[in-house]
Amino acid sequence: MNPLNTGNFSVFSTERLILLNFNNQTAIPLQTCVIKIGSNVITQESGMPDFLRIKSLCVQVASLKNKGIRVILVTSGAVAFGRKNLKLPEKTNPVLKKQIWAANGQIALINTYQNLFADLGFAIAQILVTKEDFRDRKHYLNMKNCIEGLLSQGIIPVINENDTVAITELMFTDNDELASLTAAMINADTLILLTNVDGIYTGPPDHPDSELIHHVDSKSLDLSQYIQAGKSSFGRGGMLTKLNMAKKSANLGIRVFIANGKKEGVLDDILDGNAICTHFEPSPVKHSPKKWLAHGEQYYKGEIKINEGAKKALFSQKISSLLPVGVISFSGDFEKGDILRIIDEAGNRIGLGRAEYGIKSLTEKIGLKNQKPIIHYDYLYLFTHD
């Protein structure tokens, strides 16, 4: 094998593309990649679809597929396509207007991807989701199995939020959150968030004194101080959401890149180690159930307050489950399999877990010794990096 010198990375040409961690030179096989394409990437300044950009990205994705990499697309753009197709009265309710555009535009968006990928020799499948699809563990696993089945047949899953049925309190922050959830669900090793800037800067991207932050790891300072609140022109989210989702994904063991999707060849550059972007170094990989729980803050059905002894046990080096003897009180209405939020005596949120039994059984066991854990260690996620 002949290494190619690419600055921070060395890349080896093999049957399977390999990236080397530039800190410890540990080989990481790039096998499964989630690519999120933002609204601003595939729309023009007028808000109309940018077909040339979409075609370019499809060609790049096909290149990854030809290298043996499994690719999942999380794409925005349905509203832009609907806006192109339908002229609605100005007085139309904004929420209804978006629903109509999304419902109509999703057809054109998916047909565009289908035709482009068909020309490149690949089939696609459409998956529309809402937050509810990630709440229940069984539903979550069914969705995961569906995506895995598509990937096993060489089909490219194209995922988007079902804007036509999602209501405000059950909407994803934006597709960055959906992409992060998807990457965790299918145990992806890489997540690429494509936007219309090169990455995270030390100030406004268009300010001459702002510098691009190329690398982020667990020891990096809090980058939120550099990011101004706001959202993109045609999307719901902004750079702060991307930062939060990138940090969470990296903490779960997923390598993350935030890059400019409008730059020609950006995906190839990322894989070659030549991209101008922000790269988040991954922590050790978490087990699949913990990945599910890591994104469960908005889905919990009940809350458990634990005493100081239980808290110390959970955060000790010894593997510990949460036992009823350590529970002070609880609230909510939950059943076996639901997500529970854990707080300490001061009310600080310290973690999430899957209930091993429902509220009725916990009522009978609370404070008692020698009882079955209410949350088993394998289904416990602690907020040690928030």
Image: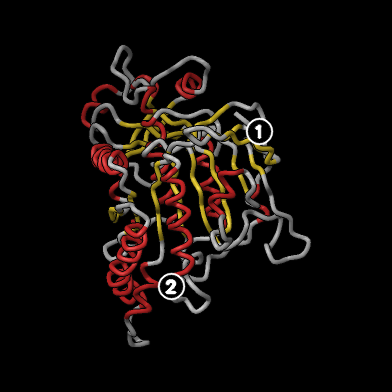
Callout 2 secondary element: loop
Rendering coords of residue 51 (x, y %): 44, 70
- Residue position marked by numbered label 1 in the rendering: 22
Residue at screen point 32% across, 43% down = 154
- Image quarter hosting the N terminus: top right
Residue at screen point 29% across, 74% down = 100
Rendering coords of residue 220 (x, y %): 67, 40
Residue at screen point 40% across, 66% down = 77
The type of residue carrying mark 2 is Pro
Mark sitting on residue 49: 2
Callout 1 secondary element: loop
Identify whether 196 is placed above or below 351.
below
The type of residue carrying mark 1 is Phe
Identify whether 252 is placed above or below 101.
above
Q: In this view, which residue lies farthest toward the left?
A: 360
Identify whether 383 is placed above or below 320.
below
User: Would residue 347 be seen by someone viewing this image from the given angle?
Assistant: no
Rendering coords of residue 215 (x, y %): 66, 43
